[in-house]
Image: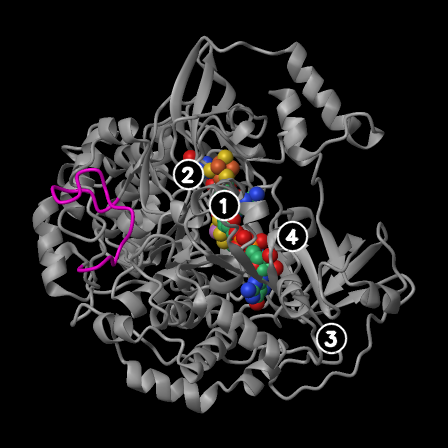
Amino acid sequence: MITKLKDFLGLDIKTDKYKKSDDALFGKVSNFKKPDEWVRSTCGYCGVGCGLYIGVKDGRPVYTKGDPTHPVSQGTLCPKGLTEHEMVDSTNRITTPMIRKDGKLQATEWDETFSTVSQQFKEIQAKHGKGAVACISTGQLLTEDFYTLGKFVQLGLESNNYDGNTTLCMASAVMGYKQTFGSDGPPASYEDFSHADVIMLIGANIADNHPILKLHIAKNKKITGKKPTIIVVDPRHSKTANMADIFVPLAPRSDLALMNGLCYIILEQGWEDEKFIAERTSGYLAFKKHIMSNYPPQEVSHITGIEVKELYELAKVYAKADKALSAWTMGVNQSSIGTDTVSAICNLALITGNLGKEGAAPFSITGQCNAMGTREFGFTSSIPGYRNFASGTDRAIFADIINVPTELIPTQRGYAYPQIIDAIDRGEIKALWIVATNPLVSFPDQNKLRRALKKLDILVVQDAFMSETAELADVIFSAATWSEKEGTYTNSERRCNYAKKAVEPLGKTMSDANIVIEFSKYFEGKHELLFKDLKSSRDIFEEMKRVSAERLCDYSGMSYELIEELGGIQWPCNTEYPQGKKRLYTEGFKCNTQDGRAKLLAVDWKPLAESCNPSFPLTLNTGRTVEQWHTRTKTKTISLLNDLAPEAWVEMNPKDADKLEVKSGDRITIGSSRGEVKNIIVKVTEVVREGDAFVPFHFSEQLINSVIIADFDPKSFEPNFKQCAINIYSQAHPEGIEQKVKISGELSYQSIQTTTKYIKEKEES
Ligand SMILES: Nc1nc2c(c(=O)[nH]1)N[C@H]1C(S)=C(S)[C@@H](COP(=O)(O)OP(=O)(O)OC[C@H]3O[C@@H](n4cnc5c(=O)[nH]c(N)nc54)[C@H](O)[C@@H]3O)O[C@H]1N2
Ligand SMILES: Nc1nc2c(c(=O)[nH]1)N[C@H]1C(S)=C(S)[C@@H](COP(=O)(O)OP(=O)(O)OC[C@H]3O[C@@H](n4cnc5c(=O)[nH]c(N)nc54)[C@H](O)[C@@H]3O)O[C@H]1N2
Ligand code: SF4
Ligand SMILES: [Mo]
């Protein structure tokens, strides 16, 4: 396996460069432990949802290998999955509950922890109202954990100020699907990547972030007999762009204009699917009028920087495909027009009839291992089972199923994540319970966040690893993690996977669900009301099945055994679809809208809240790298991963590097009107366009979120993480880049050439 890992990562074991990781690896070989048991489970990192085996020896995980029978991953795993066992017993695990005494976090017992926190929560609520206690959770727990947590926060603590890090991630996709289809729910399957003629990846760097999906693209030629045309839409020439036949390096956050422009050309040329539009959509006439009046190709070319001729080629390739699949991730969602951009992608699919059939759909790829589970059962932006807080019927039915008084169900969503931080800053929220997320690295508005957290009466952090946020806590709830607990994760294609418990929780840790259930016993009557019959994860799963029955996300036909047998089940799963369903909105499968049709929506591009200006003439883009996971609590102790990406870097175009007189390896400072990050190593590369820069957000040591703008989508509250105005300061030029830019609310990019290999080939032939 060690050699295989090296091959996978392309390591050159003979060079000194990787000596450290080699030492670590060979160290592992000499310590190598042969498992005495293999437990079949699911990867707990990303939303691809790969199947794997956990090797167990002496009651601890010692090995991870792919499950050849799993339909998603078919025996393969990426480097994070392959080293996942190392994370569980890593040196930064939290093994016991802790309380801050005399300024220091000190180990204690659960009883003291729960007594202290429950007493303070009660006092705060008595004085300041129920909503003065808030909770922020995550997309990285088991669905059973989330369901339990949401139920307790909303119905036990009776605070609706409950949200998750999913607002930093998938919220725009959720709201976009809701406004187009009347409900959330990605309509496609991974196997659609193997059937599509055209695959358009928009703001999705799957090569780094969802690597195993490439497996399904690689199978396409075998299945269809021809290579699919791959379009990559991204201002940065990411590793994924290397796979592209057509690369579209559009101006940052101009995707919505691009989608509308492609719709214009398709309608102008008569390339639309009239039958599909007539039978399956509503709002066509108003939509067409909006597009034809506002998005002529010249205008779109001006906004996106893509030439008119190329827009026509692109529209033709997409419209003429029998089956076009568009897939997107954070380049689309993390924007203050994210929700509408999602609907614009759906519009394009709808007018060309690319929905509800093999190889054709608008497909949102999820990030975290269980971001989807939170959407189905999370109790944050909706009532479990995709129900609305505002609907009296939904509230009554839900209350009836779980046997609580209807009045207990909130009539509206409480504050979203950024609003919770605002409310803490205003002094309205006094207690915060953070579960499995690390805002001190991942939240965009670090100045406000840090100021606000200091104002809290109590900060409780529930985590499995020591994080920057945990270090600040008054109380720590020590959580068990992946492999130490049983339950389910749902991946991007609605596949509910079974994560089997392989080992016992380390030290004095408990599964997140058990922490909540035990904690509820310190609140009079709450345990009896909410958790009396929930004694195991199976009991919780049975309640989830009842809650979701007859809803779009129907789990009622599932069982842990059936999920295991089939290698995951794609909801809905019920008597009509006993083994699940690959696609939503197939012929006869209605949308959750009044007329059962998908809506064609008139949506508009808007300029960036902060355009480049003479003080800050560059645009900063942020994202990820394959070796690291988010804020690194899980990856920084794994030498194989961390040695490959031990610190942040900034990608700069050679022209900008020349202006600053820097070369690769030099160190610079990045600044915006909000803050500065010093000592970032330079990588000079044409991967980024002149005027753009890219920095990964994983590293607290070079906290790029202290530079990022606090600008949010008003519909989803998702932060605009991918663009803000910065300057870069070098030793030779401490004043930074001085550049005259046109500021008029429009983007400051003039001539951007598309490097479209495909188009060139076409022209030549
Ligand atoms: N190794 C690893 N894998 C992960 C994660 C991780 O931390 N590490 N995190 C997981 C999670 S939670 C998530 S959400 C996913 C995220 O997966 P991705 O969305 O693929 O990740 P990012 O790198 O954040 O951003 C993707 C791309 O968006 C591009 N982009 C920036 N601005 C724009 C724009 O205006 N338009 C377009 N079209 N593109 C733009 C960036 O250049 C980048 O290439 O990854 C998941 N997988
Ligand atoms: N600039 C910039 N910022 C970003 C992004 C970006 O692209 N650019 N992306 C955003 C996105 S998409 C996301 S998803 C967020 C991610 O941001 P975070 O959610 O802050 O990132 P993680 O490091 O995954 O944090 C998860 C926490 O859960 C803990 N944990 C792991 N397993 C368990 C468990 O079983 N139980 C408990 N209780 N805790 C556990 C981990 O130790 C860790 O502290 O970052 C966002 N921030
Ligand atoms: S692609 Fe995602 S789910 Fe698969 S092994 Fe890698 S991190 Fe795990
Ligand atoms: Mo995410």
Q: Is residue 193 magenta?
A: no
In the picture as drawn, the residue positioned furthest to the front comes out as 765
Quadrant in the rendering for residue 691: bottom right
Find disc 2 in the rendering and name its residue: 49
**Mark 3 vs 2: CB contact within 8 A:** no
Q: Which residue is mark 1?
A: 221
At a point 13% along the width and 41% down the height, the residue shown is 529
Amino acid residing under circle 1: Lys
The magenta span reads 571-588
Q: Residues within 10 Å of mark 1 (few under 14, many from 20)?
A: some
Place of residue 379 in the rendered image (x, y in percent of width and height, measured from the top left): 27, 52
Is label 2 within 8 A of ligand 3 (CB to nearest ligand atom)? yes
Q: Give above or below for 577 relative to 73.
A: below
Q: Earlier in the sequence, mark 2 or mark 1?
A: 2
Residues at marks 1 and 4, CA–CA distance in whole angstroms:
18 Å
Cα–Cα span, label 2 and label 1: 23 Å
Marks 3, 1: nearer the viewer = 1
Is residue 575 on the magenta stretch? yes
What is the secondary structure assignment of the residue under circle 4?
A: helix
Q: Which mark is residue 242?
A: 4
- How far apart, in angstroms, are the residues tagged by discs 4 and 3? 28 Å
Left or right side of 496 for 81: right
Seen in the image, is 486 located left or right of residue 331? left
Counting from the top left corner in percent of width and height, residue 146 is at 31, 43
**Type of amino acid at the residue the image marks with label 2:** Gly
Residue type highlighted by circle 4: Asn
Name the quadrant of the N terminus.
top right
The residue under label 3 is 617
Q: Are marks 2 and 4 in contact (CB under 8 Å)?
A: no
User: Going by the image, does 376 lie left or right of 394?
Assistant: right
Q: Is residue 707 visible?
A: no
Task: Identify the residue shown where x is 47% and y is 62%.
Answer: 333
